[in-house]
Amino acid sequence: GGYVAPGSCLDTRSPNSVWRLPLDAASETLQWIEVKPNGKGPFPGAHARHTAVAYQGKMWVCGGKKSLDRYSDAGLWSFDFSTHLWCHETANLPKQAHRPGPRGDAFMWAARGGLFVYGGDRDSLTIKPPPGYPDSVMSETIVEMERFDIASKRWAPRMVVGDHPGPLQEVTPLPLFRTGDEEPYCVVFFGGFTHQSPWNAEGGDKRLAAEMCAYCATDEEEKEAQSGWNELYQKRLFRFDPEPECFTNLRVLSGEVAASAQCYIGARLDGAILL
């Protein structure tokens, strides 16, 4: 009973530990407990801006940075809650196998034996500054979705079906369960952040521009839905159904909410979504 959190972000004092908060109703105080891993490794090391989800008795950690400059190809790691062992799940992928590129600030959820990773932030290009100044790395928001099949340990790109969320990062997904079910019947997420450049800038990244053209709206309703892609901070609410892997933009009929990123999201027993 309790929550487990990823290890310290770029903190070399205990980079491979996770932290547990026991939720004991009999206790008057709540205290975090450091859970040190068993085994001799390998370990993921200190990370920042990674994404994580708890599923099938493990915590799955994907992406992020190992240093303060560029995103690393960190792969996918799991931490077993019962054995306290880390496992580099993608360490033995064949060279020709598909794998997502380095990224951070993506959001991940689990359903039907797989891990879904959407969006995030990736290094786009290095800008050469005037002499005497360090190089600057420009980032861009990703507009793609990937799925990791836990049984086969393989990544596969997924086509976005339904209302396309567009480029998105810094989002917290919320899985919703029916009573007695171990698998979510849907996942909802709100808000997020979208880099303004270079994908929508004149003379920007041509590869990403071509990526975006693949999702170009064809009718007025779709164009209206995609108009939010140009906003820096988002205030859209989406639902994702694992079967048949479809996104739905839950357009709010009344009321107003502020655009935001990195917000917490929860659900009440009466079905209301809390931000």
Image (cartoon, rainbow, N blue to C red):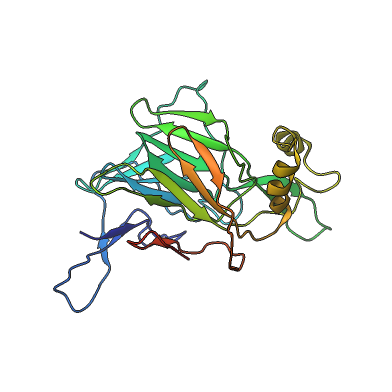
Rendered location of residue 7, percent (x, y): 37, 57
Q: Residue at x 73, y 38 (%)?
A: 217
Residue furthest to the left in view is 26
Depth order, front residue of 205/47: 205
Rendered location of residue 73, percent (x, y): 52, 40
Q: Is residue 86 above or below residue 211?
A: below
Q: Is residue 72 visible?
A: no
Q: Is residue 54 visible?
A: yes
Q: Residue at x 79, y 51 (%)?
A: 128
- Residue 96 horizontal side relative to residue 166, left or right: left
Q: Is residue 172 above or below residue 183?
A: below
Q: Residue at x 27, y 43 (%)?
A: 182
- Residue 119 horizontal side relative to residue 94, left or right: right
Q: How many numbered discs, if any?
A: 0
- Residue 265 horizontal side relative to residue 138, left or right: left
Depth order, front residue of 163/190: 163
Give the quadrant of residue 236: bottom right
Residue furthest to the front in view is 253
Depth order, front residue of 223/203: 223
| Quadrant position of the N terminus in the picture | bottom left
Q: Residue at x 47, y 59 (%)?
A: 10
Q: Is residue 136 above or below residue 157?
A: below
Give the quadrant of residue 160: top right
- Residue 220 horizontal side relative to residue 144, left or right: right
Residue furthest to the bottom in view is 28
Rendered location of residue 191, percent (x, y): 57, 58
Rendered location of residue 232, percent (x, y): 69, 59
